[in-house]
Amino acid sequence: KAGVTQTPRYLIKTRGQQVTLSCSPISGHRSVSWYQQTPGQGLQFLFEYFSETQRNKGNFPGRFSGRQFSNSRSEMNVSTLELGDSALYLCASSFGQQGAEAFFGQGTRLTVV
Amino acid sequence: QKEVEQNSGPLSVPEGAIASLNCTYSDRGSQSFFWYRQYSGKSPELIMSIYSNGDKEDGRFTAQLNKASQYVSLLIRDSQPSDSATYLCAVNDNYGQNFVFGPGTRLSVLP
């Protein structure tokens, strides 16, 4: 059974650019959550999608957006990149019901220069 | 604001000892609790989930839940150097939509 796949694994962008990250969940999972992880802030919740609808959103500026497709694959977009956006971006997939376990992809390491 | 708290560590234990990791949470409505292990530079890996008060054992790992005290713990028996990692406690709310993660406890198992 394939796990959660994130692409790309590594990315270097310059300030002001935008970036799109992709996440393919485990087959059958309908929920995809996105997290930002930095050494100082730990795992910070960005948003969660279930069946193409955003169900929950964390406290991030509007430059961070996402979407989910009918096949449950999800993309996250960050516009007007800032140096502080450098982080490991993780997505996790689950069945989406109460108590469902979530499994993480390998992450995308974004460096903004 | 839902919060999950953990001691940041590092927690150092000798090889073969029991490592005890603790977690407290603020939302009394929380129903599901998870422990993840994260090696440096890697993504979190699910170790255990627990939903009912009491103990749940899986190999060398035992999760303990006390909802009245809003407390979750993870015991690692016969600790090995390969257990050296950061352990993240995660709590899922009643609706199953949002995981709140603690800051993690860094465990170091000394040979």
Image (tube, rainbow, N blue to C red):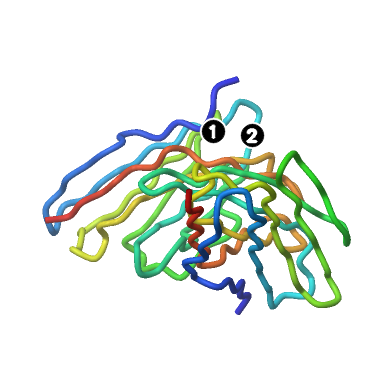
Q: Is residue A80 left or right of residue B36?
A: left
Mark 1: give few (<14), some (14-19) or many (20+) Cα within 10 Å. Answer: many
The percent position of residue A37, horizontal first and vertical second, equals: 39, 58
Q: Residue furthest top?
A: A1
Mark 2: give few (<14), some (14-19) or many (20+) Cα within 10 Å. Answer: many
Q: Is residue B51 left or right of residue A59?
A: right
Q: Is residue A84 above or below residue A36?
A: below
Query: What residue type is disc 2 on?
Result: His
Q: In the rendered view of the protein, which quadrant contains the C terminus of chain A?
A: bottom left
Q: Is residue A113 left or right of residue A51?
A: left
Find disc 1 in the rendering and name its residue. A25
Q: Is residue A72 above or below residue B86?
A: above
Question: Mark 1 falls within which chain?
Answer: A
In what element is the residue under mark 2?
loop
Kindly indicate whether the residue at mark 2 contacts the one at mark 1 (C-beta within 8 angstroms): yes
Using the image, tell me which numbered label, if any, was put on residue A100.
none
Query: What residue type is disc 1 on?
Result: Pro
Residue at the image position 41 percent from the left and 43 percent from the top: B42
Residue at the image position 82 percent from the left and 55 percent from the top: B51
Question: Mark 2 falls within which chain?
Answer: A
**Residue A20, quarter of picture:** top left
Q: Is residue B6 above or below residue A85?
A: below
Q: In the rendered view of the protein, which quadrant contains the N terminus of chain A?
A: top right
The percent position of residue B69, horizontal first and vertical second, equals: 81, 77
